[in-house]
Image (spheres, rainbow, N blue to C red):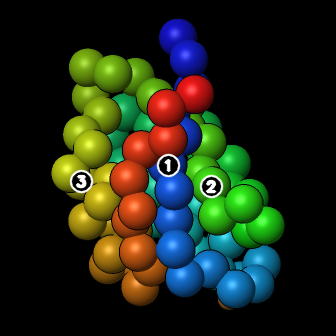
Amino acid sequence: MNPLLLKIGGMSCQHCVAHVTQALQELPGVISVSVDLASGRATLEIEEAYFNMDEAAEAIAEAGYDFLGQIEP
Ligand SMILES: [Cu+2]
């Protein structure tokens, strides 16, 4: 399946990238996470049956960043 792209605000350094990556990686249904600082994007490989977008938004917010929505590929 296609990767899921999320737009994330508030990341300013590689520490933020690591923080967001870890928060997303812990969610059910997430197979892999790649976060790009320059574009403010997270690319996720997910198992759709287990993944929940609201949980992802919450995890990003709890880590201290802004979930700005899904990017249509
Ligand atoms: Cu940072």
Circle 2/circle 3 CB separation < 8 Å: no
- The earlier-in-sequence mark between 2 and 3 is 2
Quadrant of the rendered image containing residue 52: top left
Q: Is residue 57 left or right of residue 23?
A: left
Q: Is residue 53 visible?
A: yes
Q: Secondary structure at mark 3?
A: helix
The residue at the point 51 percent across, 65 percent down is: 8
Q: Residues within 10 Å of mark 3 (few under 14, many from 20)?
A: few
- The earlier-in-sequence mark between 3 and 1 is 1
- The earlier-in-sequence mark between 1 and 2 is 1
34 is higher (above) or lower (below) than 12? above
The residue at the point 76 percent across, 84 percent down is: 13
Q: Secondary structure at mark 2?
A: strand
55 is higher (above) or lower (below) than 38? above
Question: Furthest-top residue in view?
Answer: 1
44 is higher (above) or lower (below) than 16? above
Q: Is residue 39 left or right of residue 41?
A: right
Tell me the amino acid under the disc marked 2: Arg
**Can you identify the residue that label 1 sits on?**
6
Q: Which mark is residue 41?
A: 2
Say which quadrant the C terminus sits in. top right
Quadrant position of ligand 1? bottom right
Q: Is residue 70 left or right of residue 3?
A: left
**Can you identify the residue that label 3 sits on?**
55
Q: Is residue 62 left or right of residue 10?
A: left
Residue 69 spot, x, y in % from top left: 38, 53
Q: In front here: 44 or 29?
A: 44
